[in-house]
Image: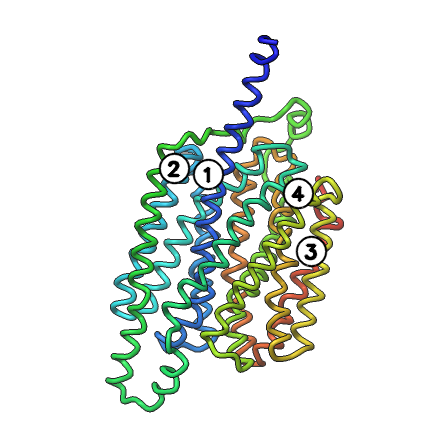
Amino acid sequence: MKNQSTLGTPQVSAKSETNRSILIIGALFFIFGFVTWLNSVLVPYLKIACELNNFQSYFVVSAFYISYLVMALPSAKILKLTGFKKGMSVGLLVMAVGALIFVPAAYTRTYGLFLLGLFVLGTGLAILQTAANPYITILGPIESAAKRISIMGICNKIAGTLAPLVLGAIVFKNTETLVEELTLMSVAEKALVLDELSERVVVPYLIMMGVLILLAVMIYFSSLPEVDTDSEDEELAKTNVNKTSIFQFPHLLLGTLAMFFYVGVEVIAGDTVISYAASQGIPLIDAKVFTSYTLGAMIIGYIIGISTIPKYISQEKALRISAIVGIIFGLGAIFSGGFISVLFISLLGLGNAMVWPAIWPMSIAGLGRFTKIGSSFLIMAIAGGAILPPLYGYLADIVNPQNAYWIVIPCYAFILFFASKGYKIRSN
């Protein structure tokens, strides 16, 4: 009996360490979500404060997400030097600098400084995402990776649900009356009022900076273990023996493109819905809840994924279903109107929920020693959130906000292709 207890102790200890690691990474995913989904409020907020049109306002999203394209490969190099744990601390500190930049941006009401702050925030997140996503994928069996990432997604989207409600309550107070009064003000009066509106973000972003610094210190001194992403088992080593370049893994390249389209449509669903609701006659103070609806729908999708993958359906099938749901809800938004149309955009969250958790393990499967660089490619694909939303904004300006949502249909169609055939293509 004593021997059995002794033999079981390392297993219990290993499981406990894994659960502790998942908890720490879950906290990081909470931070990802909170910071990322503040953009849904910043788009309409800065549109008013900095006097922008639709196209210009969506550069909020571009500045944030383009950092993933620029910084993903440097992030992989940073992690190679620092390891995962120290790299995560570095990412959090970089984000703290980005939050600090919002202070002079707000006091000077300079749109370019706001964009710089968003780019720096995105840079810190690129480092964190490059570390956290492969970490949680490798922390257990690959066939259940989508389930673990779904748990992370719930942490992410709970934070994302709270973020627009918290910041929206602060910055959108009395904005409906304010917008009407601005048209009657002199240039000097308007400048004073807009300066006051701009300064509403100072305290929230200073608090965010303090929290990020505290988390950086906590992660640095945590017990988070390192994982070896470069090791290959004997069978995988034989398969990859002639592989010399990441470009010899077509399923990764197709997965990267699918991820690009996915992030684009996820950001469109979350960050345009408040402005779209306003265009449908819903006041901003009420419209702020629609991003939370979008993220709430994603949480429901994650719970379904956790309950069904891989016990009842594979992550590949879950991805196919998600793409089909996205197409149906996208068409529903285009061909309905008013509140129902806005609700269909929020419900895109349900279709989006399992896309990231499924694409990630399907894309990096079998990469072995190429896992870090492959993960960087997928992080670079987050740039879809920088390119597709401004394109939506451009279409909204020249056509109308509702018909601009046609942009999401071909994106979901490509995701459906990857889920059906693309992930199976393992050689050029």
Instruction: Report whether 415 appears left or right of 28.
Output: right
Where on the picture, by quarter, is residue 175? bottom left
> Within 10 angstroms of label 3, few (less than 14), some, or many (20 or more) residues?
many
The residues bearing labels 2 and 3 have C-alpha atoms spaced at a distance of 34 Å
Do the residues under discs 1 and 2 have CB atoms within 8 angstroms?
yes
Q: Which numbered disc flags the more N-terminal residue, 3 or 4?
A: 3
The residues bearing labels 1 and 2 have C-alpha atoms spaced at a distance of 8 Å
How far across and down, in percent of the image, does residue 141 sit?
Answer: 64, 32
How far across and down, in percent of the image, does residue 279 sit?
Answer: 53, 80
Taking the spot 51% from the left edge, 54% from the top edge, the residue there is: 158
Mark 4, secondary structure of its residue: helix
Taking the spot 57% from the left edge, 62% from the top edge, the residue there is: 294
Q: Which numbered disc flags the more N-terminal residue, 1 or 2?
A: 1
Mark 2, secondary structure of its residue: helix
Q: Which residue is mark 2?
A: 219
- Amino acid at pointer 1: Ile
